[in-house]
Structure formats: C-alpha cells, structure tokens
Amino acid sequence: MTELDSYVAEDLKKYSGRYFPLKAGMLTRLLVKKADCTKLHPNPNDEFTFPDIGPSYRIIGEYEQKYRDAMRHGQTHVEEPLIVEKMYPDGYMIMNGHHRWAAAMRMGVKQIPIRIVNFAHEADIDEVMKNSNNYKRVTFDLDEVIFTKDDSSSEKELIFPFNRIYKERLKIGVPALFDYLKNNGYDIWVYSEKFYSIDYIRTLFKKYHVNVNGIVTGTAKKGIMGSDAKKRISDQISKRYKYTIHIDNDTVLKSTTESKDFVEFEIGKENTNWSSEIMRIIGDIN
C-alpha cells in the first residue's frame, strides 16, 4: 500500500458515518477559490476510493509532471479548479478532480484551486416530490436542448450585471414552454452532465420568470450519489409520476410508469417554432 493509499483509507475511516453535505451560500461560492489540500476529502462514492479500482498512478504521474512544468514557470496550479462540495464536519468533498488532488498532495502543494458547487441529493429530490401535487413530469437535457450558443435562436440576454453571472443563453421559446407546462400540471426536471450548482440553475430560470422542480447535475459522475440512493430516488419517481415526457430537439417521448410503454412524437421539421410545436404535441397528449 502506497502512502497515498494509506492517507485515503485513513481519511475515509475518519469521516465514515460522520460526514454529510452542506449547502454553501452565494458569498462562499463566489469568494472561496482555493483550499488547503488537507481540507479536501476523497469521495467514498467515487471509483478513486474503491479498493478494487483505486486511483490511476499513471494519471497522477501525468498531473505531477504538469505541476513540475507549472512550477518552473512560477505557477502554482494546473488544469481547471477541482469541483467540490462543502461538507460537515469540515472541509470539502471532492466531486471531480481526485487525481489532480492526489498529484498536488504528492508534490507537496499546499493549496489548490476549487469551485464550490451545491448538488441535488436524495433529501433535495424527496423535498421536490413532497411539495408537488402533480402526477406527471417533463424532463430536458440542459446542455443539449435548453442552452444554446446561437444568438439568433436564443432568448434575449439578461441585463447587466446578471449577464456577467449567467453566461448561458436559453433557446428561444423555453420560458413560454415552461410556463405552459406548469399551467398544464407538469413538474419540470432538468439534467446536465456538467457540474452546475442547483441554486445557480434555479436562479437562472427565475431571471426568465419561470421555475423548475427537479435539478440534477453532474449526472455522468458516479461519485455524487451512491447506487443505493439512486435506486431509492428512481423508486420515488416511479411512485410519484404516472408518466414522464422527455423532450429533445427533434422528438417528444412519453413513457408510462406502470406499463413501461412509450410512444414517440416527431417534432415537425416544417414548423420552425420549436416551442409552439411541442405545446401542440403536449395538448394532443393531454
């Protein structure tokens, strides 16, 4: 067992049964940009900490070389900030960047850049469903469907200074579509593989005068939520919603929870008004 392996094992043992995630306030997320490496804790749900998988010393070695190169040029960090979540009783849980953290530890780097993010956990999702009286929901992929980089097909940019904080642009028609869905008894859930804070996404939509119910980010990263929690959430969603409609750029897919049946509707290419066409399809479904 290497020194790093021993350190990780001891840290996991120290916080086992003690830690839980904390929501970081806006000021903390804006102002805290670095943290001591010893205040960053490996995630017990991440493959990095699994004894039968563990860290890749090849990847760690590559980052160590990057640190050496950076230090020769008077720099103290490499790559992007680590994505972390504030935790009790102290410090931050690593959500993305374990190998960069390990390389910094082995190189004797004292501090490393971080970005603090509030993720949705099981309790947050329970709360969404507890506060909802709806039996149907709609899901969207934030990055593939809701956000666009094409100015000609996006909603009007937010006014200053909010346009400096929220760089993402909504596809044209999204606010009207979300309002329509709410008025027709749908809960709206959005997903992203990127590491957005749930409060960041919620506030962004509020700036466009609409609300979303469920916000799940970092979906490609296994370490955010354990498999047991994911199964419990899946079971909860199945109990709450009779059917789910998933909307993308070309199709509307309705799946029924009890029968597992699904039906697909194509968004008409001849209609360039994406949101209007979806409203028509939803109207037919209703």
Image (cartoon, grey):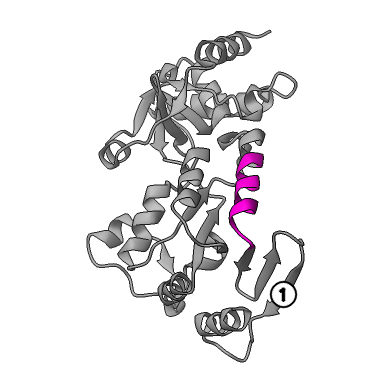
Position above or below: 122 against 94: below
Three-letter code, disc 1: Glu
Position above or below: 7 against 41: above
Q: What secondary structure predominates along the stretch shown in magenta? A: helix
Quarter of the figure that contains the C terminus: bottom right
- Location of residue 232 (image quadrant): top right
Image location of residue 133, percent across then percent down: 48, 59
Image location of residue 223, percent across then percent down: 59, 34
Span highlighted in magenta in the image: 231-242
Callout 1 crowding tier (Cα within 10 Å): few <14, some 14–19, many ≥20: few
Tell whether 63 sits left or right of 176: right
* Residue 111 vs residue 78, the one in the foreground: 111
Position above or below: 129 against 54: below
What is the number of callouts on the image? Answer: 1
Tell me, yes or no, if residue 281 can be seen here. yes
Tell whether 211 sits left or right of 247: left
Q: Residue at x 62, y 33 (%)?
A: 226
Task: Name the residue at the bottom extreme.
Answer: 270
Judging by the rendered image, the residue that carries numbered circle 1 is 264
* Residue 68 vs residue 59, the one in the foreground: 59
